[in-house]
Image (cartoon, helix red, strand yellow):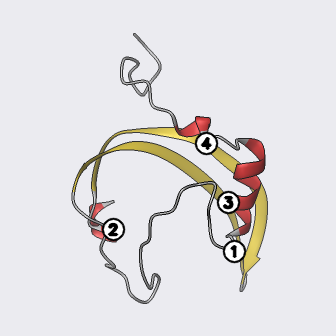
Amino acid sequence: MREETGLAIGCARPAGFNNLPFSVGERDYVTLYVSAVHLSGVPEVMESEKCQSWQWFNHRELPEPLFPPITHLLKQSPDLSVFKIDLETPADGQK
């Protein structure tokens, strides 16, 4: 994460996936979601050929157009509860 965003994270856990394949060029993609805790750092553009800027938005006030898998995610989980992290339960689900 730090290499691509400048952010250090912890407690990363799978938060689901989006089985809404889409194509860019000759590639097909399926979107995987991960939930994590911010440890340190501020967002930085580390790969300017892939990302112009980082911005924070309330999930109810996102700019249009959205990346199609994000639109689908918001229909599935409008409150984004899929990203809630229970810090009492280890990532493997074992207690």
Q: Are marks 1 and 4 in contact (CB under 8 Å)?
A: no
Q: Is residue 83 above or below residue 74?
A: above
Percent x, y for residue 52? 44, 85
Mark 1 or 4, nearer chain start: 1
Three-letter amino acid code at the position of disc 3: Ile
The quadrant holding residue 8 is: bottom left
Find numbered disc 1 in the image and state the secondary structure of the residue it sits on.
Answer: loop
Task: Tell me the crowding category of disc 2: few under 14, some 14 to 19, or many 20 or more residues within 10 angstroms, Cα based.
Answer: some
Find numbered disc 3 in the image and state the secondary structure of the residue it sits on.
Answer: helix
Which labelled disc corresponds to residue 70? 3
- Determine the CA span between mark 1 and mark 2: 22 Å
Q: Quadrant of the N terminus?
A: bottom left
User: According to the image, label 1 marks what residue?
Assistant: 64
Percent x, y for residue 24? 71, 81
Which labelled disc corresponds to residue 5? 2
Q: Is residue 67 above or below residue 45?
A: above
Query: Which is in the foreground here, disc 1 or disc 2?
Result: 1
Which labelled disc corresponds to residue 80? 4
Mark 3 or 1, nearer chain start: 1
Q: Are marks 1 and 2 in contact (CB under 8 Å)?
A: no
Q: Residue at the spot x=71%, y=86% of the render? A: 25
Three-letter amino acid code at the position of disc 2: Thr
Three-letter amino acid code at the position of disc 4: Leu
